[in-house]
Amino acid sequence: MSPAAAAMSGCAALPRHRTEVKKNIAVNSSDEKVLAFVQEEILPFVPQPNVMLSVATINDSQENSMKSVKATMERQTARRTLTNSTQMIGSLFASVNLAKDLSARCKGRALQFTDDEIQKIAQDLENVLQNIYDDLCRIPASALGSKAYMDGMYHESHEFGDQMFSSLPEVAEYIEPLYDAFFCPLTNEIMTDPVTTESGVTFERRAIEEYIERFADNSEPVCCPVTKMPMQSKTVMTNASLKSVIEEWTMRNEAMRVRISRTALSISSADTMVLEAIHELKLLAKLRGRNKELMHKIGVTRFLARLLDNHNAEIQCGALELLCLLAEDDEGKDIIGKTKAIDRTIKLLSSNTTDTSHAAICFLLELSKSQLLLEHIGSTPGSILILTAMKINNSDDPIGAEKAGAVLKNLEKCPKNIKYMAESGYLEPLQSHLVEGEMQNIRKAYFFTSSEEMQMEMVRYLSELVQEQELTIDINRSTSEILIKMAHSCNPMVHKAAFDVLVQLSLHHPNSKMLVDAGAVPVMIEELFIRKVDDEPVNSMASAATVLANIVESGIDPDTTVVNKEGHVLTSKYSIYNFVHMIKCFMPDNFNLSIIRILLALTALTKPLATVVSIIRENHRGHAIIELMSSPTEALGLAVTRLLIALSPHIGHTIVERLCKTQGQPRRLVKSISHAGRITERQAVLATLLARLPYRNTSLNIALVLEGAVPSILSSIKEMQSGIARSSRHAVQFMEGLVGALVRLTATLYSPEVLKAAMDHNLASVLTELLGGAAGSDEVQRLAAVGLENLSYLSIKLSQPPPDELLSKKNNILKLLKDSKAHSKKSSQHQVNVCPVHRGVCSPPTTFCLLEAGTVEVLLGCLENDNVRVVEAALGALCSLLDERVDVEKSVAALAELDAARHVLAALRQHRQNVLWQKCFCVVEKLLEHGGDRCAREVTGDRMLPTALVSAFHRGDASTKQAAESILRRLHKMPDYSATYVSMEF
């Protein structure tokens, strides 16, 4: 037999299946659906196993020409009629009938057709089969569960002939059978490069060459591994025909495997079948690009996006890995971009399963290589936030962190994604692109023409993030330098954009300190003091002033912050003088507000405070500041008032003088603090200003009285005490300011207008009520005690001795009505109260007597307060009753009845301040001197008093030491030198 004949005989063998067809294998119901569907809907239209294949081989002895023998296949059509009447099933029937007609034509007129006609019919038949497949793909998966549909295509027997299938590869192997001629006798694998030896047997080139190589050093002839016949020549020839047939079979086999797997994905509800189909598709996708194209064409790529919502983590992971393979070409990326795959993948980034999370990030990395999908990925809610979190937490998942960083790097090619990253707290891309000033890829894609334009875009993003999104952004040194450089630019647009973002960024204190280090202060000072921009001078200066105010308020050291080349600093007279002289009523409110903020921040330090005070006093700049206090802009009015409060201890009389000379003041001030509705911060601050200005300024106090301030203040206090006023976080400050404004009047009672107002409104009773108010703050109690002290010292002057006849008449009336209760009311109308302490007629409204007002007991209660200032003020008011101008013995008697010694000694034990010691010792000394044995026993019985006296004698100031020494003598703890001197006189 010739080699050619041997080859022909070997190739003409029946097809064989690599895996024997299993019979009667039990499979689950879902797999049965798929396999039955394939057997009934696909197998009737594909080649059957009884097809004969003939292959032509090459004969070396002939004319070195290759003659191919075409394989002829006889297609059998046996299709069961369906009973379903739906439109899709009807379309399937039409396609089946057309396929039968084409098959019948081939059988009946096979000898009459030309080659072209046969090819045309074969092409038509292939189109019919494609239509059947497309119709099947359009059937929804839910339709498989309907009884009507299943009755038409599913039977209990899943046999095709006598055979059943348990897996998808068996189905594909049955549809596209393997032939013995495809297998290499040496490797028993399908050949990819078949070659024929002189023995006529075909082998895989690599296998036969290695076989021959083993005999290279052997003198024995090489024998054919199949025929065992010696081979005279070691030359092999390519079997082109067989190679072509194998390649065609491979392409058909892979295409059929893709279609079968696609069908399994569509109609199978079993996880195992879906996983098998995904695994099969992954293998095919890795083999060649044509398989991927087919998957795109028949909808595999689009269908996989739906599987990402599957409950099975393995299916999700497998679908992601397959999508990653399919996304390697542009067509795949385009199809995926039109599905919801990206959104679902973002969700899977946070999967608890590490494999799924890694598959998702790998898939996302592949997608991010497409310029068209960058914005889609970045704009997906949560995408960049999750990616940045993965990148930051690299210790938890180093692999995921590395992939996430690569994805973010790709996403930076889209400018909008840089903004999204900054919103998610990932600022490095924005700042780096701002510093670099150029991004070639971005400019090409988004038509940026210069680095300046790109910088402008980044600056706008920064401004939007800080202003609109209200994000706190920490900038680095390089970004600060670039922004400052842009702020110094001559380009108006660049100049404005830089200042806008600097205003927002400097609000964050760490950024302000970074700007100082980068040299921002000299640029802002130049903008304020020197530079003049013709187009928008005020806006530029206002922005510079705002940035500088933010910087000064951030807590920097102004004493070391240089503002120019001459070495001036923020606290130097040069700087403060310019700041003060820039305050003008005609300037915009935002500009004036920034300058006031700068001065207010500087006055918190001793040195600049003295400079500000000196400049305002010398240059008469207070009028503009006073006028701005009434600005309709809330923030400006608040800032100016706070500045005046800070300056009032130093130039309070100057402020009062200019306040009274300013047109409309202090009428507007009184009107502003009049309570109406909810208490505002501005009302509270204005009331505080009134309380802080010098108390003994008669001009202001008279002006307040004439403007009706007293009834307005008392009305507001009453509303707050009764709860009519709505609660506010500024209520306490407002109340303290009102009481302080009321108390300031008690410092100028020598003025007739003020005295009359105090009498008319019974200030003694009002302050007594405030002193004992349970809801009042410590400051309210302190202020009330101070006001009562001022009123009490005036009681000595206001109390007048009654006439003798009035006293006589009073005694007679008392005797006549002693036993008559019926006339008690009438007698009370003529009763005159004579104060034993002041030795005259007293009443709370007219003489402000503390005894008549019942204030003493409340003052003694205040001695138990933990606040030393309240205790000090209460002792001051009590000491007014022990003045030399009153009847001290009667006063001490009144105090003793209220157990004053115990309260005073308790306060002495609790507090150890010099001023407090001095006032306590004053009361104690008077009690020892005029209180009799009872007070003496109570005072000397206190064990802590000697210790306190000794401590005060050693550590107290001169007045305290003198008071302590006087009591120690009375307690016989020190020698009485004055008594010794007198005895020597005698």
Image (tube, grey):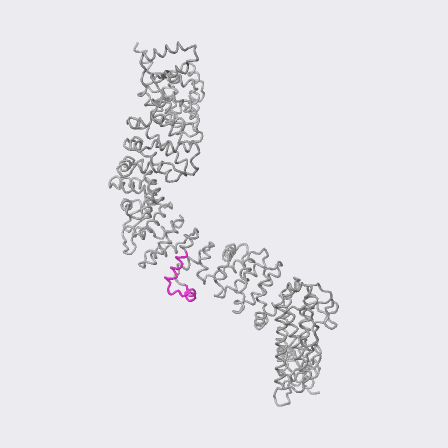
Q: Position of residue 458 (x, y in %)?
A: 40, 58
The answer to whether residue 459 is magenta is yes
Vertical order, 183 against 505 (above or below): below
Q: Judge left or right: residue 40 versus residue 664.
A: right
Quadrant in the picture for residue 603: top left
Instruction: Pick the residue in front: 201 or 595.
Output: 595
The answer to whether residue 64 is magenta is no
| Numbered label tally | 0
Quadrant in the picture for residue 890: top left
Quadrant in the picture for residue 723: top left
Q: Position of residue 740 (x, y in %)?
A: 36, 32
Quarter that holds the N terminus:
bottom right
Vertical order, 501 against 325 (above or below): above
Q: Position of residue 211 (x, y in %)?
A: 65, 78
Q: Position of residue 441 (x, y in %)?
A: 43, 65
Vertical order, 696 against 575 (above or below): above
Instruction: Pick the residue in front: 541 or 182.
Output: 541
Quarter that holds the C terminus:
top left
Q: Which residues are magenta?
A: 439-461
Vertical order, 745 against 590 (above or below): above
Instruction: Pick the residue in front: 314 or 76.
Output: 76
**Chief secondary structure of the magenta span?**
helix
